[in-house]
Amino acid sequence: MSDVSLINRLARPELLTMTPYQSARRIGGSGDIWLNANESPFANSDPAYNRYPEFQPTELIENYARYSKLDNSQILASRGADEAIELLIRTFCVPGKDSITICTPTYGMYAISAATCNVAVNEVPLTQDWQLDSDLTTKLKGSSLLFICNPNNPTGSTMTPEDIEQIIEATSEQCIVVVDEAYIEFSAQLTCASLINQYNNVVVLRTLSKAFGLAGLRCGFMLANQHIITLAKKVIAPYPISAPVGDIAAQALTVDGVAQMRQQVSELNQLAQQFASEITPLQGVEDVYHSGGNFVLVRFNSDNWFSELGQAGIVVRNQSQVPTLERCLRFSIGNEEEMKKLTTTLIDIAKQTAA
């Protein structure tokens, strides 16, 4: 773990010697009179928000460190996992020169973030059953970053930590492996977070948007060794986490908050299993794919199901334009009442189709 030669080699050269912007809160200080940040002295709200927030809110980082069983120095809070994706690309990819590798079909923001940074995207398709290509490590084409979404969005497919560890170990002198665990709470046994203490070339992305029910908050986390976190801190904005976001997120990560999340995850997982079993026999349903997230991907016999659901007032995600996902719809798992309405509507559509 002490060898950081790969990190230094992959990082954009200018970042290695660059001093990050020293915001007032990052510099710190102690005293009763704060006149170092050109803030307004008038506290016009309750609670007062006239002062800039901490660069990385202490309570939030401590709570997430406890939750993830990592050290504070291994955690960077960001505006959702989406910002962390872009931070990694900006940190390790030289525009117009470097590339990332993604395993398709997968989350679309990897490619979008790369494109906005003028970074090439190398696609290595998943296998027919949506597992990693056995020859993946020979198809990286010199990429600086390899993104693996586990559980994978939009397919819901999962990879074992052992399989991912093999990739990490095999690429230890090639690239940084980024494991996106946005949905990991729904398949907690699959986490790769502990591998951060064993390998230098692994980053784990997390979010509070899914299992914690805080999508509107926009709070995510980059988990990595201290060297990667230090570099990413040179790229991130001076105040990425607003004071209200930091307070609400820290509360969600208390012992009680985590317990509530786990109870809700258990409920959603049960609803997902029930939904899958109820719609599998329906005429017109070709495949209901096992999912490790809070959604279920279903392949139908035609594209009409999406419009029929829309007419019934049910909005789902149409994945039909994604290669290999023709006639596929992705269903987020809602509450019990919503899922009953969805199931009933699908049964009605199936009957109409069969008539």
Image: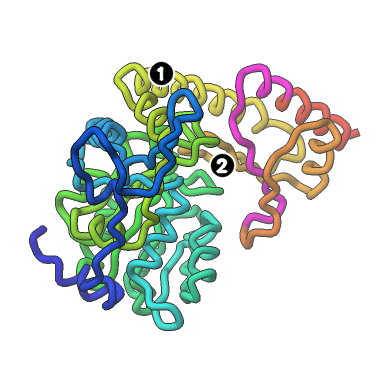
Specify whether 87 is left or right of 291. left
Q: Is residue 77 above or below residue 125?
A: above
Q: Secondary structure at mark 2?
A: loop
For label 1, the crowd category at 10 Å Cα-Cα, with few meaning under 14, some 14 to 19 and many 20 or more, is some
Q: Which percent across, then down, holds residue 177?
A: 31, 60
What residue is shown at x 31% (from left), y 34% (from top)? 60
What residue is shown at x 80% (from left), y 31% (from top)? 313
Q: Quadrant of the N terminus?
A: bottom left
Amino acid type of the residue tagged 2 in the rendering: Tyr
Q: Quadrant of residue 271?
A: top right
Q: Specify which label sits upstream in the sequence, 2 or 1.
A: 1
**Magenta highlight range:** 325-341
Q: Is residue 47 above or below residue 283?
A: above
* Residue farthest right in this picture: 355
Q: Which percent across, then down, holds residue 139?
A: 38, 74
Amino acid type of the residue tagged 1 in the rendering: Gln
Q: Secondary structure at mark 1?
A: helix
* Residue farthest left in this picture: 2
Asked if residue 340 is among those painted magenta in the image, a careful observer would answer: yes
Residue underneath mark 2: 289
Residue 260 — which label?
1
In front: mark 2 or mark 1?
1
Q: Which percent across, then down, holds residue 199?
A: 18, 57
Q: Quadrant of residue 140?
A: bottom left
Specify whether 126 is left or right of 34. right
Q: CA distance from mark 2 to mark 1?
A: 28 Å
Q: Quadrant of residue 32?
A: top left
